[in-house]
Image (tube, rainbow, N blue to C red):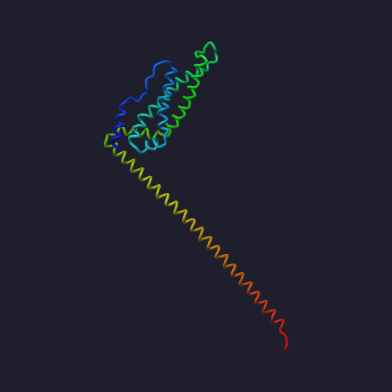
Amino acid sequence: GAPMLARALEAQQGSTAGPATKGPAYKQASEEVLSIRAILTQWQDAALQAAALSDAATSIRAHSELAPALARVAGLRAKVQGMQKKAEEPDPDLQTYGAAMKAKVLALVADFTALASDAEALQGAMEGAMARGEKLLSLSAQQREEEAAAVVAETAAGEAAAVVEDKRERAAVISAREEEVRAKAAKEEEERAEARVRMAEVDEREREAARSGGGGQAGPG
């Protein structure tokens, strides 16, 4: 509704960048990974993803919240790769990390790799919703309401069409079953008719045999 849309617009006015983290590169990268992970985890919810495709406020939220988080993943990649290169340095004279820090860095690399994979999946799944949110932000209030109404109408039409299609499919299944029953009944009736014909032929042969036998036994009185 309008209040939710207004709140989404207010949230968009704030900064979309991640929290500023000071300190060593490892600490910065670790906290950035945790911060981004929290956002991505929210958007992995199927219900929230579905809402972003039909609800204007959620579409705007996807654009203002998820899109920057995905961009932060891309921005963090070079830093993590640089740390990984240092951790995997084979020359003892060039190594800058001790054993403990090397283990921490490699664990961070693994966390970032999983994060990047999830980000890529969300980018594909939510690209349309994020683009719609960006479009909604560029519209006037009246245009946003019209766009939201159009999406609601489109969704309702799609659901109605799905119901009609479901009824059509069910009717086709019922019709096919009825046809199968009719065909089976017709086949059974045909078999019964053939049986009656065979029985009639047997009876006729027996009567003919009886007549022939009776005529042969009769003699002069």
Residue 178 image point, x, y percent: 48, 58
Residue at 40%, 32% in the rendered image: 43
Report the residue that reaches farthest toward the front.
100
Report the residue that reaches farthest toward the bottom.
221
Task: Name above or below for residue 9 compared with residue 156.
Answer: above
Report the residue that reaches farthest toward the top.
93
* Nearer to the camera, 136 or 22: 22
Task: Name above or below for residue 149 compared with residue 181.
Answer: above
Task: Name above or below for residue 122 compared with residue 186.
Answer: above
Residue 10 image point, x, y percent: 29, 29
Residue at 30%, 37% in the rendered image: 1
Residue 176 image point, x, y percent: 49, 55
> On the picture, is 213 further left or further right than 75?
right
Residue 36 image point, x, y percent: 41, 26
Q: How many marks?
A: 0
> On the picture, is 94 further left or further right than 31?
right
Instruction: Quarter of the image for the C terminus: give it.
Output: bottom right
Residue at 41%, 22% in the rendered image: 32
The part of the image, by quadrant, that contains residue 45 is top left
The part of the image, by quadrant, that contains residue 53 is top left
